[in-house]
Image (cartoon, rainbow, N blue to C red):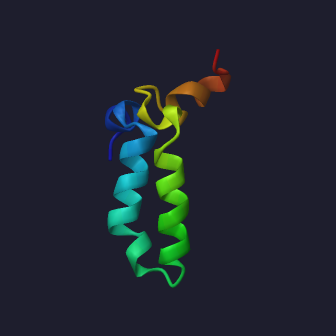
């Protein structure tokens, strides 16, 4: 993933990608999937601003 794609990725997209590709191979996938499901209900997961974009170069979110 290049930098520009990371800047456009929402937390929702990152969590869903992690859940599909990485979490399924873990022993704790049931509890991890439950935690991801809870995170996906949070309004911040739909924000177009990414965690990377917010905190890059020492900037803080408003």
For the point 37% across and 37% down, which residue is it? 9
The C terminus appears in which quarter of the rendering?
Answer: top right
Find residue 60 and report its horizontal and vertical position in percent. Answer: 67, 21
Tell me if residue 21 comes above or below residue 62 in the rendering: below
Tell me if residue 39 comes above or below residue 9 in the rendering: below
Tell me if residue 5 comes above or below residue 38 in the rendering: above
For the point 42% across and 33% down, which residue is it? 46
For the point 40% across and 26% down, which residue is it? 48
Query: Residue farthest to the bottom?
Result: 27
- The answer to which of 22 and 58 lies nearer the viewer is 22
Find residue 4 and report its horizontal and vertical position in percent. Answer: 34, 31
Residue 47 occupies which quadrant of the picture? top left
For the point 33% across and 41% down, which residue is it? 2
Find residue 8 and report its horizontal and vertical position in percent. Answer: 35, 31
Residue 31 occupies which quadrant of the picture? bottom right
- The answer to which of 10 and 34 lies nearer the viewer is 34
- The answer to which of 2 and 60 lies nearer the viewer is 60
Tell me if residue 58 comes above or below residue 31 in the rendering: above
Find residue 6 and report its horizontal and vertical position in percent. Answer: 39, 38
- The answer to which of 48 and 43 lies nearer the viewer is 43
């Amino acid at each position: 993933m290049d930098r520009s794609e990371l800047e456009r990725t929402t937390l929702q997209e990152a969590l869903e990608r992690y859940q599909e590709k990485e979490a399924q191979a873990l022993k704790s996938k049931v509890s991890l999937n439950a935690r991801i499901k809870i995170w996906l209900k949070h309004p911040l997961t739909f924000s177009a601003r990414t965690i990377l974009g917010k905190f890059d170069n020492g900037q803080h979110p408003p």
